[in-house]
Amino acid sequence: MPQTRQTGSKRRRCTRAGSSAAALLLLISCVPPSTMLAGDASDSTNGNTNENSGGSNDAQRISFAADLVPLFTARCFECHRRNGLADRSGISLRFNEEEAYASLVNQPSSQSPDWTRVVPGDPLNSLLYHKVSEDDPPVGSRMPLNRTPLDAAQIELIRRWIAEGALNN
């Protein structure tokens, strides 16, 4: 369902697939082959030629603990921790290792309960993906706030993790 958003004196409708689809295509074109989805044409370990061939390659799945927690710790933890800027601003999202997964997956946004932070299997309906990949996300500001944005590979890592089901692995 489209989100309606107030900007100045104008109202606009944001479709979650609109500008996100263009941004996603741009991101995918910038992603190095080493970060492609499991089972794609570059995968020589299981003989699959595309991601729909039925095989699964857990070695290439995104690991929340090994891949995302270090990213969140390096780029998000400064503000998203107890008594950090986000916490003091009433945003209950925390990126420390013990609370990160529970704070993200299937949790409503503190800023807009109409949005879910991470919807497993659905990056375009996951606010986290929009907040790290768009200059003007549907709620709040681009993250990390007042810092260098995540690079294309980091954004793709988050997108893939969500698309793979946002597993706590």
Image: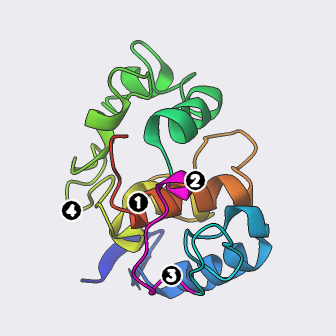
The residue tagged 4 is 114
**Type of amino acid under label 3:** Glu
Image coords of residue 63 (percent x, y): 48, 44
Question: Looking at the image, is mark 1 or mark 2 earlier in the sequence?
Answer: 2
Find the distance from the CA under tag 3 to the CA under tag 2: 31 Å
Q: In this view, does 79 lie above or below 130?
A: above
In the image shown, does 149 or 4 lie closer to the viewer?
Answer: 149
Dot 4 and dot 2 residues touching (CB under 8 Å): no
Span highlighted in magenta in the image:
50-61
Residue at the (37%, 31%) spot, across then down:
100
Q: Residue 162 carries which label?
A: 1
Nearer to us in this view, 130 or 64: 64
Crowding at label 4, few (<14), some or many (≥20) Cα neighbours within 10 Å?
few
CB-based contact (under 8 Å), mark 1 and mark 2:
no
The Cα atoms of the two marked residues, 1 and 4, are separated by 18 Å
Q: Determine the CA span between mark 3 and mark 4.
A: 32 Å
Q: In this view, does 58 lie to the left or right of 134?
A: left
Q: Is residue 126 magenta?
A: no
Residue occupying image coordinates x 42% and y 22%? 97
Q: Residue 142 carries which label?
A: 2
Q: Circle 3 — which element?
A: loop
Q: Quadrant of the C terminus?
A: top left
Whether residue 139 is visible: no
